[in-house]
Image (spheres, coloured by chain):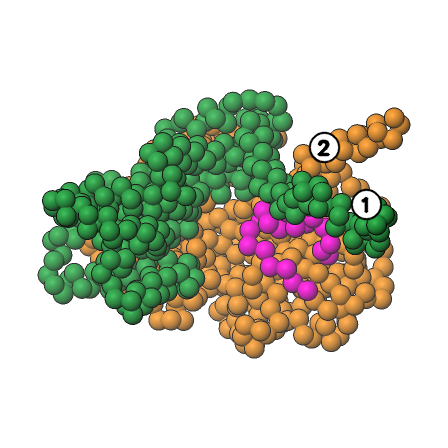
Amino acid sequence: MTATSAAPRTLIQRVSNYLYVRPRVSLLMLLALPLLWFLIVYIGSLATLMVQSFFHLDGFTGQVVRQFSLSSYAQLFTPANVDIVQRTAGMAGVVTLSAALIAFPLAYFMARYASPRMRPLLYLSITLPLWSSYLVKVYSWKLILAKEGMVSWVINTLRLDAALDWLLGLPEIGGPSLSISPIGIYLVFLYVWLPYMILPIATALERVPKSLIEASGDLGGRPGVTFRRIILPLAFPGVVAGSIFTFSLTLGDFIVPSVMGNSSYFIGQAVLSHQGTSGNIPLAAAMTTIPMLIMGIYLYASRRAGAFDAL
Amino acid sequence: MLHKSKSLIQILAICSLLLAACGGGGATAGGPLQSVGEGEGRVDIIAWAGYIERGETVAEFDWVTDFEAATGCMVNVKVAATSDEMVALMNEGGFDLVTASGDASNRLISGGRVQEINVDLIPSWSTVDPRLQEAPWHTVDGKHYGVPYQWGSNVLMYRTDVFGDEAPTSWNVIFEETTLPDGESNIGRVQAYDGAIYIADAALYLKYHNPELGITDPYSLTRDQFNAALDLLRQQRELIGRYWHDAFIQMDDFTNEGVAASGSWPFQVNILKSSDVPVASVVPVEGATGWADSTMMHIEAPHPNCAYMWLEHSLNLNLQGDLAAWFGTVPAVLAACEGNELLGPEGCSINGLDAFDQISFWRTPTSTCSDGTENCVPYHEWVTNYIAVIGGR
């Protein structure tokens, strides 16, 4: 038995031996492509965006000046832009809160009470709307909520006009009709993002061990206490996961507020109009950092609240 | 060492190229084509949706098949949705022609992306409406950079069941609070366009009603004139439920939301009429804003001969008339107004032919005023301010 008989003979054997003793190289080869993709496409474009946001527009010629400046950021604090940020973040917050309130009982039923035959059907009916085009749904909602649309007709038939008029007469959120008011935007956002809230909550609730709930009962915990001390804390990561979806999706959307509502701009729409003919790329880039910042704070706060501990 | 510094220079060069993209090239052509030779078998055109139809949407509207049969040039259309997209595609290159609007055409000329057209090679040039032949959106320093294609105007569309037989004569029905002929206020029942270029519509209104402001060109406004237009638009904000952006949403608003009057395109008027919604349109006394499109040729057009053949074909009477009927526009060749079955005898005047002198054609506002001074408000400020107005500021 000499050492030579164990020496690799073919190229493939030599390569595989080489990689076997150097696991880091094989790991690098495996990850190189996705890593490059991530660095160039994601981080690279974000970095370009950040760089652009520190340029500014020459007020006189309207050309982009490629020098470091904070003037685009200063412009974010004009009353009109502060309005836009408040409007968008406020809507995202209200939509998220309402979605959580509606989704929780539904998810609870699905996870705890629905029969094994019923459950897949419920999941299917929740994901079913996601199969059709988002645009089709938004445009149909415009028709449904129109002044001469279905909802108004039902309200009219039930003789509840006074209630609708009162609702539409409210300052800030009212308008000439449901579709031409912030209420309309809210309803459509709530509709299109609700599945993204229900699914993570239902998944989280399914993972709450039945034995813990029973134990709580055995130890004298009333249903309310069991819910507050056992179920809610254990399902909370699901609520946070869902809220990240609904919050960030609302924050970035520019289609719903362009089809519904009273035409007041949301962040996405403002970015869209600054980057076009206007050529105000620096301001558009500075505006996109706002949702990034808000989401950053949101994720940090969620982490502090322990929402990711179970992941 | 030499190698290293060379590659460093290359990297720097690439970086600066990336940064300078859209800064406009300085390409200069060696003058226009002098004769049209054999076709190259293909022509690539960037066009607005519906501008170059080959009978695939509606069979009667086909002005490509004949051209392909006659010249052997296969037409490839790349549809663009905005002027910015057109400019971006032209900067990218690889196309022969583009149907550019007035807010893109001058950018393309000054960016050096289009070449001078030799009009002697286009036999039908003489049939073009003389008012369009020397138009400033395609003619610079006496050189033609485009062939007029179609033009249209932003008309005042109104519901006839609200206004009765009396057509509104002024834009005041959408700028000032007033009682409409059906006895109800116009609050919440009128619309305006949600793009910043709409500030020009307000300026046009002020040009007529507040002559002391001294507005001559609604696309070149000094700070005072601009602020006056914004004040008018803030007043208008109180009347408007929602601004319109998408033609089909506006049609829905006229049908289902009780909107009674709005600035609009003949396109919407024609479609609503054909679906029996009681609407009509008018160009009010103040005049109207409008757009004029020209076919322009890329500086490095890969198929110049076929491109010239298309330019000639684009002035063809059938094409011009059919397109006007299809899109609600007015042909660049006036002879096309007569005897076109699809357009009908009244088609051109419905689409605004007689109002030519009252139309202020779209172009992008810059800090350079139309009189050459540098006191005007550039377009990026139009955008920020109009967003503020729509948001109630």
**Label 1: element kind:** loop
Binning the other alpha carbons within 10 Å of mark 2 as few (below 14), some (14 to 19) or many (20 upward) gives few
- Residue pointed to by mark 1: B29
User: Residue A120: x and y, percent?
Assistant: 33, 66
Q: Mark 2 points at which residue?
A: B16
* Crowding near the residue tagged with mark 1, few <14, some 14–19, many ≥20 C-alpha atoms within 10 Å: few
Q: What residue range appears in magenta?
A: B76-96
Does label 2 lie on the same chain as label 1? yes
First reached walking from the N terminus: tag 1 or tag 2: 2
Viewer-closest of B365 and B211? B365
B7 is within the stretch colored magenta? no
* In front: label 1 or label 2: 2
Residue B124 x, y percent position in the rendering? 72, 63
Pinpoint residue B111: horizontal percent, then vertical percent: 69, 41
**Who's the residue at 73% across and 54% down the image?**
B94
Rendered position, B19 above or below A113: above
Amino acid, disc 2: Ser
The residue under the point 58% across, 47% down is B84
Q: Between A113 and B46, which is closer to the camera in this rendering?
A: A113
Question: Looking at the image, which residue is at 15% across and 48% down?
Answer: A217
* Chain assignment, label 2: B
From this viewpoint, which residue is outermost toward the right?
B2
Q: Which chain is rendered orange in the image?
A: B
- The C terminus of chain A is located in which quarter? top left
The CA span between labels 1 and 2 is 24 Å
Q: Residue at x 16, y 51 (%)?
A: A165
The colour assigned to chain A within the rendered structure:
green
Visible residue check, residue B140? no
